[in-house]
Image: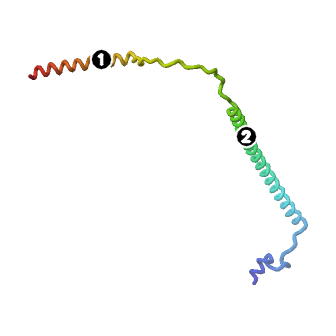
Amino acid sequence: MSKLGKFFKGGGSSKSRAAPSPQEALARLRETEEMLGKKQEYLENRIQRELALAKKHGKQNKRDELMAELEELEQEELNKKMTNMRLPNVPPSSLPAQPDRKPSMPSAARRSRAASSRRAEEEDDDFKQLAAWAT
C-alpha cells in the first residue's frame, strides 16, 4: 500500500515535504509564466502562418473560380449568338443546264490510253511472228 500511497499522494507524508519559500515559489511562478508566454508566441506565430497560407490558397482558388465563371459566361454568350444566327439571304438563281456531251478525258489519260493501245498492237504483231515461226 505504500507504493499506491506514494503514487497518489506524491510520495511520503505531507509533513516530510516542506513548503517552498516565497522566493522559490516566485521563481517557479516566473518560469511558468515565461514558458506560457513562449508557448503563446509560438501558437500565435503558427496561427498567423496558417492564416496567411489559407489566404494565399483562398486567393488562388477564388481566381480559378472567377476564371471558370468568366469562361462559362463567354460560352453562354457565344451559344446565344450561334442560336440567333440565320442563313444569309441569297437571291434565287437557276443553275445552268448540264451539257449533253460526254465529258472529255484529261490529256494524261488520253496519252496513257494511246500508249497501251500501241503496246497491245506490238504484242499482237509479236504473237503473229512467233506463230509463223512455229509453223
Q: Amino acid at mark 2?
A: Glu
Depth check, front residue: 92 or 113: 92
Q: How many numbered marks does the figure carry?
A: 2
Q: Residue at x 77, y 48 (%)?
A: 49
Residue 10: percent from the left, percent from the top? 80, 75
Q: Which residue is nearer to you in this view: 108 or 30?
A: 108
**Which quarter of the image is occupied by the C terminus?**
top left
Please, what is the three-letter code of the amino acid marked with disc 1?
Ala
**Which residue extends farthest bottom?**
1
Q: Which residue is mark 1?
A: 115
Q: Between disc 2 and disc 1, whose residue precedes? A: 2
Which residue occupies 87% across, 72% down? 19
Instruction: Give the colouring mode of the picture.
Output: rainbow
According to the image, label 2 marks what residue?
69
Q: In the depicted view, which residue is nearer to us: 112 or 29?
A: 112
Q: What element does badge 1 sit on? A: helix
Image side of residue 57 versus residue 113, left or right: right
